[in-house]
Image: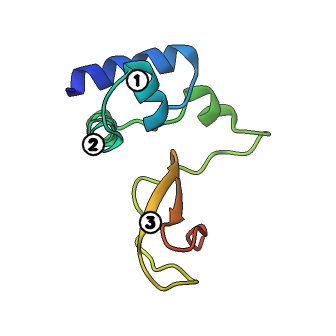
Amino acid sequence: MDQAAVKAAMDTLRSQGKSLSAGNIRTVLGYGSLRDILKHREALVVSQGEAVVPSGLVSEGVFGAPIPCHQGRPLCLCGRCGYAAWFEWDVGVWRCLLCGIDPPA
């Protein structure tokens, strides 16, 4: 798998209006580890300076509310367990790996 394949899958998802989640990219590609897909997706997003949600959602928002865009892993400790073991639950949505709660706002 290379970055060009991930970029092509991301372009396909954009044209369909779907989110650029690692699972969706893997579905389009039909192969690849989520780790490698995330690595290539993040490199593309950083190099192009764009959000990983469809443009219609960013401008209009869901139910009229703007969508917050987290650029990376939260830089705080979990309020319940006290660790910083965050994983990306969905695009821009982070949860604690140990107890499953969202990071503090």
Task: Name which of mark 2 and mark 1 comes first in the sequence.
Answer: 1
* Neighbourhood count class around disc 1 (C-alpha, 10 Å): few under 14, some 14–19, many 20 upward: many
The amino acid type of the residue labelled 1 equals Met
Query: In x, y percent, where is residue 14?
Result: 49, 20
Rendered view: 92 above or below 22: below
Q: Name the residue under label 1.
A: 10
Query: In x, y percent, where is residue 20?
Result: 47, 32
Any mark on residue 39, and which?
Answer: 2
Q: Identify the image quadrant of the C terminus.
A: bottom right
Where disc 1 sits, the SS reads helix
* Neighbourhood count class around disc 2 (C-alpha, 10 Å): few under 14, some 14–19, many 20 upward: some
Q: Identify the image quadrant of the N terminus.
A: top left
Q: Relative to 83, is 44 on the left or the right? A: left
Query: In x, y percent, where is residue 100?
Result: 58, 67
The amino acid type of the residue labelled 2 equals Lys
* Neighbourhood count class around disc 3 (C-alpha, 10 Å): few under 14, some 14–19, many 20 upward: many
Residue found at the very far right of the displayed protein: 63
Per the model, the C-alpha gap separating discs 3 and 1 is 24 Å
Name the residue: 44% across, 76% down.
76
The amino acid type of the residue labelled 3 equals Trp
Any mark on residue 86, and which?
Answer: 3
Per the model, the C-alpha gap separating discs 2 and 1 is 13 Å
Where disc 3 sits, the SS reads strand
Name the residue: 58% across, 74% down.
104
Q: Relative to 67, is 23 on the left or the right? A: left
Name the one closer to the observer, 76 or 5: 5
* Total labels drawn: 3
Name the residue: 23% across, 21% down.
4
Rendered view: 8 above or below 79: above
Task: Name which of mark 3 and mark 1 comes first in the sequence.
Answer: 1
